[in-house]
Amino acid sequence: AGRCVVAVDGPSGSGKSTVSRRLAVSLGAHYLDTGAMYRALTWAVLRSGVDLGDTQSVAKVAGEVDLRIGTDPQGYAVTADGVHVEKEIRGAEVTGAVSAVAAVPAVRELLVARQRQLIAHAGRIVVEGRDIASVVAPDADLKVYLTASEAARARRRSAEDAADVAATAADLARRDKIDSTRTVNPLRQAADAVELDTTDLGIDEVVARLRELLTERG
Ligand code: C5P
């Protein structure tokens, strides 16, 4: 089969990661978690000790770190300067800082370019993030925007992280606000994206629906 790019965007807790991974497995395609790239870069920025508000220094660290990410939906490696950071990037420290780092224009420019290379190289791939349909892969074969009620999103994320629901809800609201109001590539639904509300849908139902949409598009 030829090239096929599926763009999956949406806020945290909308079911993006689980759905995108499952879809990639069922299609026999690659999978790219762009959030993991912003998280790994954030880990490197935190380790460097530069002030998060010093965008020039943040951009400098971003330009120097050797960031690598796999595209196997069954389990991918993420390394920064050779250090495996799969666990660290899910921790509270990185989660608390990632939206600030992702709002730095030079950081986005760098990672968007990298993401486009990975997509071109993979050929068949499901890509998840915030700006995939609008910026990274505007020519994607299918663009999906996943949503879910705030309550459902907080419930899912706190179950994943074994964290308190109220604290998770507050953190999601805080990140959504930064992600959707930043000046460069904010979280936004692309005009030609299919919106899917996953609040009352199971993972299998969402994946089945996306496969249907892909078939309809030939
Ligand atoms: O998807 P995930 O929650 O892992 O993303 C972490 C953060 O990375 C988001 O809150 C957002 O600030 C940033 N991000 C982004 N653009 C993307 C993917 C993630 O700005 N394409």
Image: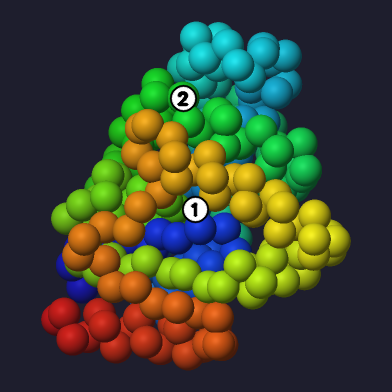
Q: Is residue 148 above or below residue 114?
A: below
Q: Is mark 1 within 8 Å of ligand 1?
A: yes
Query: Which of 80 and 211 lies nearest the eye of the viewer?
Result: 211
The answer to which image quadrant residue 7 occupies is: bottom left
Q: Is residue 124 visible?
A: no
Residue 38 on image: x %, y %: 53, 38
Q: Is residue 191 above or below residue 35?
A: below
Answer few, some or many: residues within 10 Å of disc 1's Cα (few below 14, many 20 plus, some between 14 and 19).
many
Quadrant of the snapshot with the N terminus: bottom left
Colouring rule applied to residues: rainbow
Residue 151 on image: x %, y %: 66, 72
Residue 108 on image: x %, y %: 40, 31
Picture disc at residue 104 = 2
Picture disc at residue 33 = 1
Q: Earlier in the sequence, mark 2 or mark 1?
A: 1
Q: Amino acid at mark 2?
A: Val
Q: Is residue 181 visible?
A: yes
Query: Which residue corresponds to the image point at 26% horizontal and 66% vertical from the top-left?
Result: 193
Q: Nearer the viewer, mark 2 or mark 1?
A: 2
Query: Which of 75 and 6 lies nearest the eye of the viewer?
Result: 6
The answer to which image quadrant residue 26 occupies is: bottom left
Answer few, some or many: residues within 10 Å of disc 2's Cα (few below 14, many 20 plus, some between 14 and 19).
many
